[in-house]
């Protein structure tokens, strides 16, 4: 699903966030990305979502070298990825339903199909009864589940999560992680950046550990060099 | 590798048929246009000031246009009152005078050619000047014979009339050819200048409209900065993000143009009474014209177009700067 080949990322200020990272995440695999803050976790996720471009090296998504994706095609690239954020990034002036429907509206799904797909996604995260509420009326864990419903509603083959449990207590965190496992079980590839080592250890999924922009432990496959 | 790219692409697009996509695009347009209009109407306090400023900026050139149209209509009937006078040379024979009269009568530029003989001129002078007695002391009648010409409607402008006068001046028996229309020339010259100033001011005001709409849209974009970042993250194209802002600009322009048309028509209605009094005093059938329906339509199209362009410029400039992080 994802391959990194000797990827470097240097920001404009000169800060080098990634220094030659290589790994491969197989289709339908779920893995954790861990390391201290500033180790390069967020940069790595941003490169996949084309929020940043690598300085050197190749990022392959679904067989495509994404450095070839032109700027105006970035939106279509992002529709293949469901993204989940620590701060949820919901639209606070719109209902839960409208938040979850947003990717479908953007992708041009017909009005006829939107309601059932939104409800299916909300049902999966257990928020079917909250669709009319505003995000502000929900708890932190519920808001995060709205974020997850929004990420999966368009059935993307890949989920990226950046510290999805950062603000949640251990019990809620475990629930959220179980949710990700359910998506993985139906064939979605999942990559979760987190520094909650205890939780990660209990989950028994491959871990990629970064330190100062370098891979210090890689339980995933090495990326093959195919030229 | 290229093969898989292609497969991946069609897999995402094939979910939605072409017809459905067209339907969806139309429904998005409908939703965007309705919701942006409602946003403006729902928060009149926010948008009212902007719309009023836009309306005034649009009303000024429209009012100017209406008044210049009216001024043209007034001067359109200028040749009714203007005559040309050909003073004949003193030794002109009766026959030569008749020949010239016949020649001029045949020309389409003149409605009427009348001869005022030396004797008639003298009588007229005596009765109107009050110096009649003084003429008794002269041996000769010093006044020349004169042909008075009334131009037809073919002579539409003062410059055409001037060409005619210059030509008649060349006639053998004509001493001096004159036209009593300096005021018309001055009036036209003033009108011409006023129109140029008006066009210049109109261009400036149109630019003002662009800038005002552009700035309003800029603020709207900055206000929704986070929302824009979020929807870019979930795969919105620039077109999708741009559309509601363009509609907002469009509505601003259209509503302002409607208000401007209203303002101009109110001013005309207020002035119509005094204008007709004035026209009566000059025994003219002139009556003040308002904005014709076709002009109102162009004003609306112009306003909406300026709003759209202003929004377009602003959106293109500022949307690029907002990237998710």
Image (tube, grey):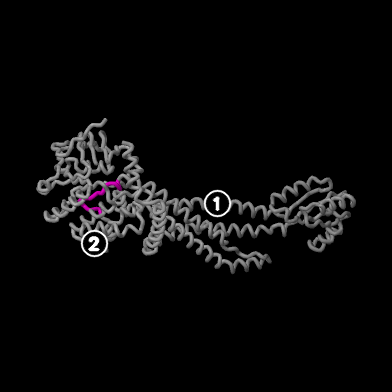
Residue B216 visible in image: no
Q: Residue furthest front?
A: A186
Q: Which residues are magenta?
A: A78-89
Please tell me how many numbered marks the rendered image carries.
2
Residue A134 visible in image: yes
* SS assignment at label 1: helix
Instruction: Give A68 or A28, whichever is nearer the viewer.
Output: A28
Query: What's the mark number on residue A210?
Result: none
**Percent position (x, y) of residue A166?**
16, 51
CA gap, disc 1 to disc 2? 66 Å
Residue bearing mark 1:
B197
Quarter of the figure with residue A118: bottom left
Q: Is residue A86 magenta?
A: yes
Taking the spot 17% from the left edge, 44% from the top edge, the residue there is A31
Quarter of the figure with residue B273: bottom right
Residue bearing mark 2:
A128
**Percent position (x, y) of residue B289?**
60, 63
Instruction: From this view, report whether residue A189 is shown above or below residue B116.
Output: above
């Amino acid at each position: 699903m994802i391959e990194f080949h000797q990827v470097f990322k240097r920001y404009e200020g000169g800060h080098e966030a990634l220094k030659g990272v290589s790994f491969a995440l197989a289709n339908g695999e779920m893995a954790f990305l861990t390391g201290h803050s500033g180790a390069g976790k967020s940069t790595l996720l941003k490169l996949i979502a084309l929020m940043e471009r690598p300085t050197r090296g190749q990022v392959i998504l679904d067989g495509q070298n994404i450095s070839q994706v032109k700027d105006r095609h970035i939106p279509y690239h992002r529709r293949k990825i469901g993204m989940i954020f620590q701060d949820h990034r919901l639209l606070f002036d719109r209902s839960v339903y409208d938040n979850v429907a947003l990717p479908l509206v953007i992708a041009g799904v017909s009005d006829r199909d939107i309601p059932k797909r939104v409800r299916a996604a909300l049902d999966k995260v257990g928020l079917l009864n909250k669709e009319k509420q505003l995000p502000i009326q929900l708890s932190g864990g519920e808001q995060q589940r709205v974020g997850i419903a929004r990420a999966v509603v368009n059935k993307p083959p890949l989920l990226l999560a950046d510290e999805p449990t950062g603000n949640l207590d251990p019990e809620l965190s475990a629930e959220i992680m179980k949710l990700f496992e359910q998506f993985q079980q139906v064939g979605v590839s999942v990559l979760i950046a987190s520094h909650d080592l205890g939780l990660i250890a209990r989950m028994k999924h491959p871990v990629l550990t970064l330190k100062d922009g370098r891979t210090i432990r890689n339980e995933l496959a090495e990326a093959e060099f195919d030229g | 590798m290229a093969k898989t790219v292609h497969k991946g692409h069609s897999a995402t697009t094939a979910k939605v048929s072409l017809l459905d996509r067209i339907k969806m695009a139309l429904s998005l347009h409908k939703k965007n246009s309705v919701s942006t209009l409602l946003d403006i109407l729902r928060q009149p306090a926010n948008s009212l000031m902007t719309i009023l400023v836009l309306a005034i900026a649009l009303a000024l050139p429209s009012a100017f246009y209406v008044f210049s149209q009216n001024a043209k209509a007034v001067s359109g009937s200028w040749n009714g009152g203007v005559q040309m006078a050909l003073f004949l040379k003193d030794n002109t024979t009766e026959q030569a005078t008749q020949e010239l009269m016949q020649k001029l009568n045949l020309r389409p530029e003149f409605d009427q050619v009348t001869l005022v003989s030396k004797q008639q001129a003298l009588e007229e002078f005596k009765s109107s000047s009050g110096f009649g007695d003084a003429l008794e002391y002269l041996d000769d009648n010093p006044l020349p014979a004169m042909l008075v010409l009334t131009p037809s409607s073919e002579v539409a402008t003062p410059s055409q009339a001037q060409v005619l006068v210059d030509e008649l001046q060349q006639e053998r028996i004509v001493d001096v050819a004159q036209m009593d229309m300096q005021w018309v020339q001055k009036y036209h010259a003033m009108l011409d200048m006023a129109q140029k100033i008006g066009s210049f001011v109109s261009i400036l005001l149109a630019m003002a409209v662009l800038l005002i709409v552009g700035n309003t849209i800029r603020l709207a974009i900055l206000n929704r900065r986070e929302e824009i970042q979020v929807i870019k993250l979930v795969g919105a194209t620039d077109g999708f993000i741009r559309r509601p802002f363009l509609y907002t600009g469009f509505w601003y322009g259209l509503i302002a143009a409607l208000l401007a048309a209203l303002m101009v028509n109110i001013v005309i209605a207020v002035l119509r009474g005094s204008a007709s009094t004035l026209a009566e005093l000059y025994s003219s059938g002139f009556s003040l014209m308002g904005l014709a329906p076709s002009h109102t339509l162009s004003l609306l199209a112009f306003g909406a177009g300026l709003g759209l362009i202003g929004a377009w410029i602003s959106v293109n400039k500022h949307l690029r700067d907002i990237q998710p992080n």
